[in-house]
Image: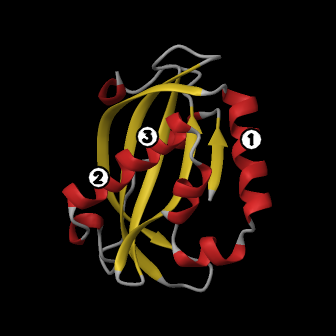
Amino acid sequence: MFSSCSSDCALTRLAPRVDQADGSSVDRNAARTLSDSVANDLLQDDKDAIQSRFEKVLRTSTTDKEFNSMLSQVFELYGKPLEFEFKQDELGSKTYSDGETRPMRKFWYAAKTTRYEKGSYFLIVEVIPDDGRLAVSSFSMVNFPSGAPPTLK
């Protein structure tokens, strides 16, 4: 659901296999609206709204206490978010441990927090189709110790 990365691991571009659906089947505008809502919910510290936007498997397998604890750890590590600026979106697919593959859109935002200036860290929100609606499969904060790629500057 949430991950962080402070290495070049986030530089890997999404490259779906030919036999997998890519994110182009996910409506960009609707997915962007959902992603922007998550960013706004983070700014407002609206844990209930964030949790309600996750895919069904995460909503049903994570207790409120567990989710609130994870989100508190995010704020402790990166600071409270103050601003997000949309930078780009990518198409791809998400493969689950059971082999299921879903199309995905990944949205990137430059983040400003109480601990870091904007552009030091980036929020990533992944949106997938789930149970007849769009849902968030994960979000993460990442940085690039060697410098952000040009598309994120």
The amino acid pointed to by label 2 is Thr
Look at the image and tell me in which quarter the C terminus lies.
Answer: top left
Secondary-structure class at tag 1: helix
Q: Residue at x 52, y 56 (%)?
A: 49
The amino acid pointed to by label 1 is Ser
Q: Residue at x 53, y 40 (%)?
A: 42
Please state which of residues 141 and 83 is positioned toward the viewer in this rendering: 83
Quadrant of residue 109 within the rendered picture: top left
**Residue 2, image x, y percentages:** 63, 52
Q: Is residue 113 left or right of residue 92?
A: right
How much space separates mark 3 and mark 1, taking CA atoms? 16 Å
**Residue 17, image x, y percentages:** 36, 71
Which of the two discs, 3 and 1, labels the residue nearer the N terminus?
3
Q: Residue furthest top?
A: 117
Q: Residue at x 69, y 46 (%)?
A: 71
Q: Residue at x 66, y 25 (%)?
A: 79
Secondary-structure class at tag 2: helix
Tag 3 residue? 40
Tag 1 residue? 72
The amino acid pointed to by label 3 is Asn
Please state which of residues 20 and 116 is positioned toward the viewer in this rendering: 116
Which of the two discs, 3 and 2, labels the residue nearer the N terminus?
2
Tag 2 residue? 33
Quadrant of residue 9 within the rendered picture: top right
Badge count: 3
Q: Classify 10 Å Cα crowding around label 3: few (below 14), some (14-19), many (20 and above).
A: some
Secondary-structure class at tag 3: helix
Give the colour scheme of this rendering: secondary structure
**Residue 83, image x, y percentages:** 45, 25
